[in-house]
Amino acid sequence: MISAPTKAIPTIVGQMKRIVSQKAGFPIWQKSYHDHIIRGDAGYRRIWEYIDTNPAKWLEDCYYEDGVTKMSKQKEEKTNVMRILDQKKIPYTPHAYPVGDAAPDGVTVARLLGQDPAAVFKTLVAKGASGGYYVFDIPVAATLDLKKAARAAGEKSVAMLPARELLPLTGYVHGGCSPVGMKKRFPTLFHESCLNHETICVSAGKVGFQVELKPAELMALTGGSAADLIVEG
């Protein structure tokens, strides 16, 4: 008897893309993939021909942009977060994704990178009742539970920082906020699920860029700790 797969196809494809990009040292995949059920010889021949001729059509691809030149630029571009990680000798994998007129949401970023959304974390900033500021990193598809966040921060309550105050306080803009390299170091908490992953992704401090690294090393760098922070269900 053939057993059912234990993981969904998008998760398997995402893991494959992540591993190959890590080995290459820079992103090499387009933003999505195409899946198709082969139902007969004709379908099989079409897929075979597509795979066989695909490399020859690479120059015509809208994402090509001189291929190696584009990938080299992505590999060479460094954000401040990357420079900090380099200085601290913390291993990481850089990732880049296409950006339009507005920063994409976190789930879209995970899809563009071929990553599991559960392992891609967004950085949120909140203000406590005492007047102190706190940084919370949670999975991109999750919602911050303000009561849990306040309890973890030792505050009576916390409220999300207004978007207009993010840049002056942290030096980062919405969609490019990272727990690393803020103007000032704030108490930082990560949702406890980060410890279930070998590596996680966070913003590299610039829209269009992420860094992937071990959660323990990220927490050590930021002085962070793990706690239950998200709304369940």
Image: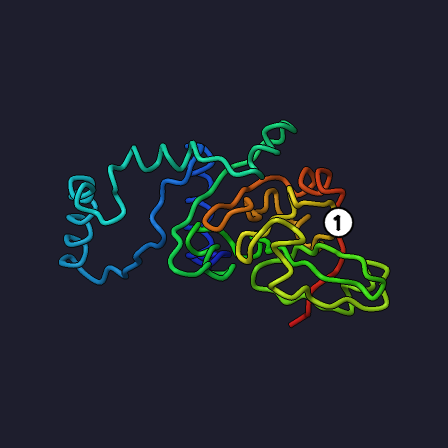
Quadrant that contains the C terminus: bottom right
Between 176 and 91, the one lying in front of the other is: 176
Residue 191 placed where, x, y %? 70, 56
From this view, report whether residue 49 is shown above or below residue 153: above
Q: Is mark 1 on a helix, strand or loop?
A: loop
Q: Which of 216 and 159 is in front in this view?
A: 159
Display colour scheme = rainbow
Q: Position of residue 92 (x, y in %)?
A: 56, 35
What is the crowding at mark 1: few (fewer than 14 residues within 10 Å), some, or many (at least 20)?
some
**Residue name at image x 57 percent, y 56 percent:** 118
Q: Residue at x 59, y 43 (%)?
A: 199
Of the 4 image quadrants, the one containing the N terminus is bottom left
How far from the left and from the top, in percent, is residue 75? 42, 34
Residue 90 in which image quadrant: top right
Count of marks placed on residues: 1
Relative placement, left or right, of 216 versus 150 is left
In the image, is residue 108 above or below residue 95? below
Q: Nearer the viewer, residue 50 or 59?
A: 59
The residue beneath circle 1 is: 186
> In which image quadrant can residue 126 be found?
bottom right
| Residue at screen point 29% across, 33% down | 68
**Amino acid type assigned to the residue bearing label 1 in the image:** Phe
Q: Residue furthest bottom?
A: 233
Corner quadrant of residue 219? top right
Image coords of residue 176 (percent x, y): 54, 52
